[in-house]
Amino acid sequence: MNNILVAESVSKNFGDFKALNNVSITVPKGSIFGLLGPNGAGKTTLIRIINQITMPDTGKVILDNSPLQPKHIKDIGYLPEERGLYKSMKVGEQALYLAQLKGLTKAEAKKRLKHWFEKFEIENWWNKKIQELSKGMAQKIQFIVTVLHQPKLLIFDEPFSGFDPINANLIKDEILQLRDQGATVIFSTHRMESVEELCDHIALIHKSNKILDGKLNDIKRTYKTNTFEVGLVTQNETQLMEDITNTFETSVADFKSLNNDLKLNIKLKDNETSNNLLSFLTSRAEVNHFNELIPTANDIFIQTVKNN
Amino acid sequence: MSHLKLIIKREYITKVKNKAFVIMTFLSPIIMIALFSVVGYLSQLNNNKERTIAILDDSGLLSEVFKNTKTTTYNILTETSLEDAKTFVKNKEVYGLLHVMAAADTSKLDSAIKFYSKETPSLSVISSLENKLEKKITDLKLQQSGVDISMISASKTSITIQQESFEGKKTSKIDNIIKLAFGGAAGYLLFMFIIIYGNMIMRSVIEEKTSRIIEVIISSVKPIQLMMGKIIGTSLAGITQFVIWVVLGGVLLVVISSIFGIDMAAVQSPQQELLEQAINSNQLQTQAQHMVNGIYNLPLTNLIIAFLLFFIGGYLLYSSLYAAIGAAVDNETDTQQFMFPILMPLILAVYVGAFTVIEDPHGTISTIFSFIPFTSPVVMLMRIPFGVPIWQQLISIILLIITFMFTVWFAAKIYRVGILMYGKKPSYKEIFKWIKY
């Protein structure tokens, strides 16, 4: 099997509250998997189950073809959303301690930490206490500690919160590099632009249920409405508008352009192709802008959550 | 297992390196000894203060009992009226005036004595005066009814009953005092240890919660490992601190008392002073002998083994509950409502130990409380020096272990859920729900 993680019909109740209801996800090896959902949907519960912090009531989780066991702890790196470090402990000692808890020897941990500290140019932080560092600086340490033991599966819960754009970019590049080196990444976030940028697979959890999952591009394909954004220039705009609205479903579009265009969203009929539309338009006006409207992850998120 | 070791090591090292902990470790014995020395010095000052007490004896019967001592001078006034005596005393550096009114006969003397002073006189001065007067008046009364006083003092007897168990072990009252001292010290030590270091564990759990590192840690280790690591690590730090306290305290005590020449034994109440006066030097020596015998007679092996077992068992029992409280709340102010049910049995145990065990170490109440797991560590430790049958100790320890395993399981449940709960102050009802999660 080419899936690093398979969760099968996982349910979890907290007293009367149903945190997860029969949720199944499949995370392919080497992918960046976006776990999405509004606040309180059950994402963190699912992540905690994968990390063996909580046990599911029913259902099972399979990691790398074998049911989840304590020995898998070293195969997973987890950066929780609620994260912190011991405030009065020195950065180096702390990183060593956390790395050793993940099963690295002290010597190995030291070697790898040295490498990462050099990479991020933060060697002089080693003897500082966490309380002397800014939030963003502490986050960097947490990131290093999460990936240090080179786990097969990395789970990041809102990894970019607290970072400035430069450091967010740095972390993003590191995540992509780790993926290229063979790690799989589960990525939980509310920031849809980073989903757009990074994820190839997504699952959407809403009110304890999974309501959508699959390859991001496939999902986009099913959500697209065959609508094209066009910018047209012509002598007689009223005549043109009349022609178009007689044949197609339209709405006013809003995009930036240098010309004083007539901006429209035009929806294709089921049996038509983009070429039909284009030839229809070129025969009547000058086409300055022609662009298929692809739904963004943000649109899909809002639309699916609202419909459920 | 290596996880547990790592956690213990980290807990121990951070505790021991913590500035407040280091300062407390070295400052506490110094402060304690300093306080002790000041009290000792002051009470010595007080005792050594020379006083003059004026005596106006209108009855003419009692003035002979007032003999000057190192610290008290008696100024016997004669041929003055009470008013003159009062003004005399007021204008001079005199502590007070004892006035004995003229009385028709000795039976009226009891109510004919008054003490005048500027301020309320000290208890020890008054009781020493009272002692002297009582003795003299009693003698006078006896004399009046024709009793020979020398015969009475000749027939006075003091008895120390020789105690011996059926096994032939000789004991005495002093033995019992030593037993009480050992048992009391062991029980009280455990009590203090639980309160100080239980709190420390609780705070360290809360710290992990507030710094939000907890989720990072428990994605690597089991919550119960973290909890046990915390308890053991903190306890080791506590033992280190205790040992330093004892050693440092002992050294300081010796050094200070030799430098300043303060006799620490002088720090005591007037009653003790009187008691000591009653015991002459000869008796003192035999007492010392008794004391050595008493310690020798203690069931030492039993005491040490039982101390270790009950100490560890009792401490773990309570500290796991402290850890659970720490996990259930977000900050220290919220801990109050949960502290009470923990402190209750502990305080009860100390009370039972202090009142019932002293009265009757093998009585029903002491025995029952030395079986109840939440009070048994303290109460049993206090009872053991008096000789508790092994089967009783075994039952008690087994009950303690069973309860301990149950509380650790219970605490681990609360801990596991609680450490990931933020924001709301949980109620008891909610906490009991967590057990089912």
Image: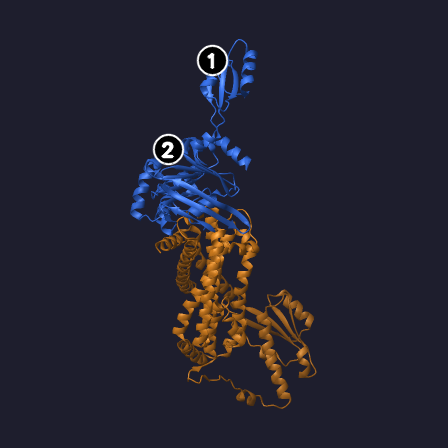
Chain colours: A blue, B orange
Kindly identify which numbered label has been placed on residue A173: 2
Residue A222 image offset from top left, x and y in percent? 47, 31
Instruction: Residue at 45% x, 33% y: name it.
Output: A219
Name the quadrant containing residue B2.
bottom left
Q: Secondary structure at mark 2?
A: helix
Chain designation of label 2: A
| Dots 1, 2 in contact, CB < 8 A | no
Three-letter amino acid code at the position of disc 2: Asp
Name the residue at 39% across, 35% down. A171
Q: CA distance from mark 1 to mark 2?
A: 43 Å
Looking at the image, tell me whether mark 1 or mark 2 is earlier in sequence order: 2
Callout 2 crowding tier (Cα within 10 Å): few <14, some 14–19, many ≥20? few
Residue B407, which numbered label? none
- Is any part of residue A87 visible from this angle? no
Q: In the figure, is residue B119 to the left or right of B195?
A: right
Chain letter belonging to callout 1 = A
- Image spot of residue B225 (x, y percent): 41, 55
Residue at 35% across, 41% down: A2
Residue bearing mark 1: A282
Nearer to me, B376 or B221: B221
User: The residue under label 1 is which amino acid type?
Assistant: Thr
Q: Secondary structure at mark 1?
A: helix
The quarter in which the N terminus of chain B is drawn is: bottom left
Q: Residue furthest right?
A: B104
Q: Indicate left or right for A117 with B249 as reference.
A: left
